[in-house]
Image (cartoon, rainbow, N blue to C red):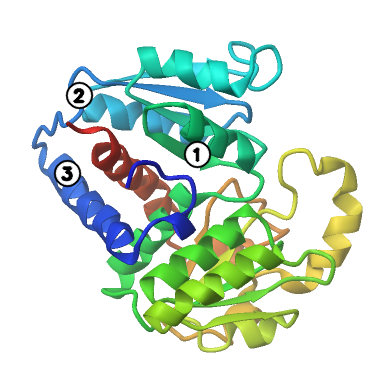
Amino acid sequence: MKHLLSIHDITTDEAQQILSVAQDLKSKQKKGIPHPILKNKTLGMIFSKSSTRTRVSFEVGMYQLGGHALFLSSNDIQLGRGETIYDTANVLSRYLDGIMIRTFKQSDVEDLAKFGSIPIINGLTDLLHPCQALTDMLTITEHKGKLEGLKLAYLGDGNNMTHSLLYAGAKLGVNVSVATPKGFECDDEVIANAKEDAKKTGAVIDISYDPVQAIKDADAVYTDTWLSMGQEGSKEERLNVFKDYQVNKELMGHAKDDAIFLHCLPAYRGYEVTEDVIDGPQSVIFDEAENRLHTQKAIMALLMAD
């Protein structure tokens, strides 16, 4: 594994290794055992899209691994505009040991990997969110003791989060059932790729418009904001379209009694999820948020260590 651009690009063994290393690093951190695996290493963090959790978790993660993280905002670097991605990738490769990028176009992430000579980590694009999906698999493992054969239901927008959950489930043997409103479906190519990956692990990929069908007998239930960054202008329209996909007590009643609830945050209580669910006993959102730190540390360690 030279980069983490998409979970579709890595093998099942590599995905499992990320989770295993994350568990080990989490255990060491909890016990106060130093693990300076990336001593004297520097990670460049390019943010074309801002994020509290992504910045803090990567920056703290590099510190705990003995390295240093350098924040580069859209004011510091204009990817593909003032300078070509080819030039940017080559220059930064001379300074840094790795790059995490959170941006809009998936092609920008792929071009950095193509033209640079250091590991590239996809911190989020409009198409994919691989670090979060691997984090979610770690969280499910902690609460359920396994992944293979479990059912994960996703309700809401067919977005970057949904795409990466499809890829993660397919690679790790998790049955993923997605329900979206018409007009907000997942990317066709992503669905096809996930179904192809699923053939190797026996996972079942189910895509529908029916939230009750999707959540039935689920071991884990997932949703995401209905209003991602830049979509605020269509708020009223989206709220009306998505109202039947709200994760509430009634809908959760169709999942297994011991189902857990996940959300990548930020969450808007009363919209995609009700307070009694997200703040209730089935919610594991803060374990999930913490696990971003440990999972990303594992990814950085595996990619950047000597």
The answer to whether marks 3 and 2 mark residues whose Cβ atoms lie closer than 8 Å is no
**Left or right, residue 12 beside residue 191:** left
N-term mark: 1 or 2: 2
Nearest to the eye among marks 3 and 2: give it.
Answer: 2
Q: Residue at x 38, y 63 (%)?
A: 137
Q: Is residue 289 above or below residue 224?
A: above
N-term mark: 3 or 2: 3
Q: Could you say which is closer to the camera, residue 282 or residue 23?
A: 23
Disc assigned to residue 30: 3
Residue that label 2 marks: 66
The answer to whether marks 1 and 2 mark residues whose Cβ atoms lie closer than 8 Å is no
Q: Is residue 189 above or below residue 5?
A: below
Q: Is residue 138 visible?
A: yes
- Which quadrant, please, contains the C terminus? top left
**Disc 1 to disc 2, C-alpha distance:** 20 Å
Q: Secondary structure at mark 3?
A: helix
The answer to whether marks 1 and 3 mark residues whose Cβ atoms lie closer than 8 Å is no
Amino acid carrying label 2: it is Gly
Quadrant of the rendered structure where residue 104 is? top right
Q: Position of residue 32 (x, y in %)?
A: 11, 37
Q: Secondary structure at mark 1?
A: strand
Within 10 Å of the Cα at label 2, are there few (<14), some (14-19), or many (20+) other Cα atoms? some
Within 10 Å of the Cα at label 3, are there few (<14), some (14-19), or many (20+) other Cα atoms? few
**Left or right, residue 263 beside residue 96:** right
Amino acid carrying label 1: it is Gly
Disc assigned to residue 123: 1
